[in-house]
Amino acid sequence: MFELLLRGKQLPENKKGIKIINRLVLLGFVSIFIWYRYRQSTFISVQATLLFLLLPGILLTFWGRKKLLNLCGYVNTIAGNKLYTLLTASLSYLLTSLMFSSTFFALTLLSNHYFSNPQQTIKTIKIINVTRTHNRKSSKDYTYIIVEHDGLEKKINYGKKNPSEMNGKALQITTENGLFGFEIMKKRKFVEDKPTK
């Protein structure tokens, strides 16, 4: 496949354009850490997350694939070779998603968080499951809880906390309504789980 890609490198590289692409890729990697961090405290569905991460990449690949390839010195197609077209389209999509989709999602979560409605609401939600996992790299055990709020499940990391400490507990959360309607968890603490009558 690498040889096939080299066959398509028939144009001069745009060094200025490649420098911009490299910077956008770096920004994309930084954005992954940003949106991962803020997604932890945001109640957003898996479907919405996938929409933010997949759709911009698809649209931008469809619109700018040829230009992206030309900037890197590659032709758009090789006559009679559909595999080359498929390969370059896939690589263009991955690159575009990293450069733009990841950054767009990070900016969305940041805006949702920092321009939220300051009015806070306190709610008590049930803990669905408590899981203890072992990290082979660090040789440490970590505890996760899974809660459900407004039909959305969220996994929350509680580090080294013993799962037995969570028996008979519920989670009390303080939330704000974000700029785009995604609820933000500002505070959380364990409370006694009172059975509903």
Image: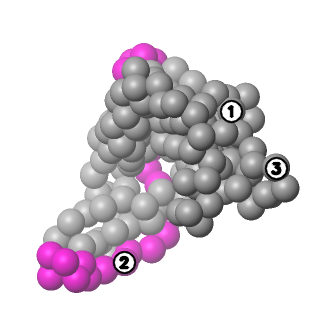
Residue annotated with mark 3: 79
Q: Which residues are magenta?
A: 113-139
Residue 190 in the image: state x and y as whole percent.
Answer: 29, 58
Query: Marks 2/1: CA distance?
Result: 47 Å
The answer to whether residue 122 is magenta is yes
Q: Is residue 71 left or right of residue 28?
A: right
Eye-nearest disc, 1 or 3: 3
**The C terminus lies in quadrant:** bottom right
The label on residue 66 is 1
- At x 82% / y 49%, what residue is drawn? 79
Nearer to us in this view, 37 or 195: 37
Amino acid at circle 1: Lys
Eye-nearest disc, 3 or 2: 3
Tell me whether circle 3 and circle 2 mark residues in contact (CB < 8 Å): no
Query: Marks 1/3: CA distance?
Result: 15 Å
> In what element is the residue under mark 3?
loop
Amino acid at circle 2: Thr
